[in-house]
Amino acid sequence: MKVLGIETSCDDTGIAIYDLSKGLLINELYSQKKIHANYGGIIPELASREHTRKIIVLLDKIFKKKNIMKEIDLIAYTAGPGLVGSLLVGATFACSLAFSLNIPVLPVNHMEAHLLSPMLEYKSIEFPFIALLVSGKHTQIIAAYKLGKYEILGNSLDDAAGEAFDKISKMLELKYPNGRELSNLAAKGIKNHFYFPRPMIHHSNLNFSFSGLKTFTSKVIKNSVLNMQQKANIARAFEDAVIDILLIKTKKALSQKGWNRLVIAGGVSANTLLRKRSQDMMKKCFNGKVFYSQLQFCTDNGAMIAYLGLLRCNEARTSSLEILVKPKWSIDSLSQILI
Ligand SMILES: Nc1ncnc2c1ncn2[C@@H]1O[C@H](COP(=O)(O)OP(=O)(O)OP(=O)(O)O)[C@@H](O)[C@H]1O
Ligand SMILES: [Mg+2]
């Protein structure tokens, strides 16, 4: 069985094909980052326009590499959460293509796709586990009981971790968007040159807040002589604070549940220090293991959508003219996956 996955929730157009027996056959991505960099943030109207321009180009590229259009059994697409215009492009395209090929189509949840993306490599991550979902718009701690059965234990009350990384990197005049640039710069910073606050770590709940940390960091930036070393010191203090906050809350969740498996997923899971420190924590405190994806599958991609499509293939509907998107679609409202 072959599933074509289409991802257009934000500013990345991703298309991939996942095969039940052979695994990932192809994975193509077109990133719009350079376009939005000119504006210092994502412009929704431009994002949907770019998806429209690039989605057919990508599909052509794929089927030129592998002539297997007729072998596709199912098309899965991101129906939400995300930007409505961007979602509509992927959804319309997926439903039209499925209709013309006379194959079923399946709307899938972007956050579940992120959460399960480490399974692209580790097929058998055992349930239950705690998932730390850290992306551009989400910071959530999730109890994953079974495939499809998730409970949100903690949520960001304001900015997402990735969003905070992006805003601070902009204040430090790094290229947009850039968690990764900020993290590379932080690696050159002097540890403990600054100490930034860690909001909400003493609260008994598992929620997060990053806006106070962001304001604190912006004040330090304004009051500093910004040579490269000082920028690196600020980046380091900011990154240390974010990772401390994420891991303190994650540790609480693992202890509360008495579990020793952790999945970190979403764009921020590409962060080298977060990966290393979560690995150390799992080994030292829980005699357990952390799972995360290859870097290319941490941020948005079609592979995770195709893979989730395969897992949920029993829910696919034969192609109709209905085009479904859900810009707000919480992961805890999903149905259990019956395989
Ligand atoms: N190495 C890194 N360190 C920290 N943050 C990073 C790193 N690499 C990427 N990011 C952040 O990951 C985010 C992008 O992740 P992702 O593509 O999962 O988000 P999104 O799709 O925009 O949001 P969502 O999935 O919540 O809808 C950006 O905010 C980016 O700064
Ligand atoms: Mg995403």
Image (cartoon, helix red, strand yellow):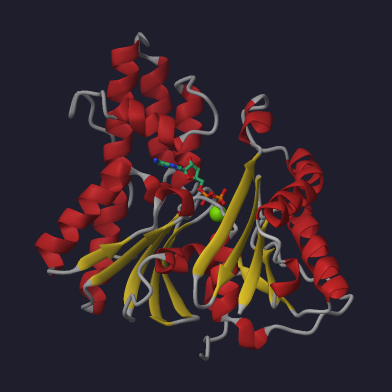
Residue at image location 51% in from the left, 42% down from the top: 163
332 relative to 315 in the view: left or right: left
294 relative to 22 in the view: left or right: left
Residue 5, quarter of the rendered image: bottom right
Quarter of image, ligand 2? bottom right
Residue 191 in the image: x percent, y percent?
Answer: 18, 29
* Residue closest to the eye, 102 or 250: 102
Residue at image location 77% in from the left, 41% down from the top: 50
* Residue closest to the eye, 92 or 146: 92
24 relative to 207 in the view: left or right: right
* Residue closest to the eye, 106 or 197: 106
Residue 244 in the image: x percent, y percent?
Answer: 25, 47
Residue 181 in the image: x percent, y percent?
Answer: 42, 30
181 relative to 286 in the view: left or right: right
> Which quadrant would the N terminus be assigned to in this image?
bottom right
Residue 288, quarter of the rendered image: bottom left
Residue 147 vs 205, above or below: the answer is below
